Amino acid sequence: EVQLVESGGALVQPGGSLRLSCAGSGFTFSAHWMYWVRQAPGKGLVWVSRINGDGSQINYADSVKGRFSISRDNAKNTLYLQMNSLRADDTAVYYCARTTAFVSTADWGQGTLVTVSS
Amino acid sequence: DIVMTQSPDSLAVSLGERATINCRCSQSVLMNYNNKNYVAWYQQKPGQPPKLLIYWASTRESGVPDRFSGSGSGTDFTLSISSLQAGDVADYYCQQYYTSPITFGQGTRLEIK
């Protein structure tokens, strides 16, 4: 069974940093593109970043470019999102998702809540 | 970026009746080389992550009841839920994965009338 488990969400002050993790199991982690998607309270789904299987291809949404950094450790089956210079509008539930041959975000974790507030 | 526009924003349907949600893309998401439309539909219940229902516009994900069906091609797509059940109350999102960045519709809230 495919499982994705996010962690690392917290309350952080504006300008602060946070690192999210997403542990994958039940599949060959290194074979899949992985995504971060966020959802602000009461709002819709917004793509944040993606990374290919070996980490050589990375893309970011304009809203986080230069502030967020995606990475992965395939030996630990873990995806990361380093978030710096956090702003109030970064407040959201952050989901990691796995790509399959059929669709970009086939399987999703339960999400981790990031709250940016003073 | 491809803009995905869903209609309606909210929908109330009686139990046992059909619900229909529409999604329009700002450009075609039909891949010519394989003739597939790169549209997916997701269901999200309160406090839960999105769940994949449909991919390639009309292919049901494994385990999804056949009451859920997707149709459309090019720029216009539809998710239909026949014989609505109480457990279908949720937010529904369309998504295009034809090109990066992937983008989602704004969501449609489905309720029981």
Image (cartoon, grey):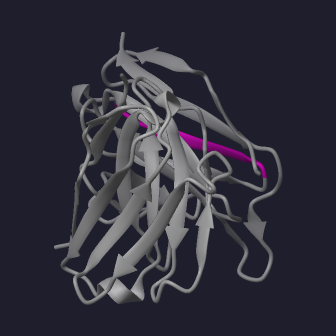
Nearer to the camera, B97 or B89: B97
Q: Is residue B24 above or below residue B36?
A: above
Quadrant of the image for the N terminus of chain A? bottom left
Q: Is residue B66 visible from the viewing direction of this image?
A: no
Residue B1: x, y in percent?
77, 51
Instruction: Choose between B82 and A74: the one closer to the eye.
Output: A74
> Horizontal placement of B112 versus A71: left or right?
left
- Main secondary-structure element of the magenta-colored stretch: strand
The stretch of residues the image draws in magenta is B75-83
Name the residue at 22% across, 83% down. Answer: A76
Q: Position of residue A10 (x, y in %)?
A: 25, 40
Return the x and y of residue B43 as percentages of the image width and height: 38, 42
User: Looking at the rendering, which quadrant does residue B109 occupy?
Assistant: top left
Horizontal placement of B19 versus B72: left or right?
left
Residue sitting at 35 percent across and 38 percent down?
Answer: B44
Is residue A101 covered in magenta? no
**Residue A91: x %, y % from top left:** 42, 33
Q: Is residue B80 magenta?
A: yes
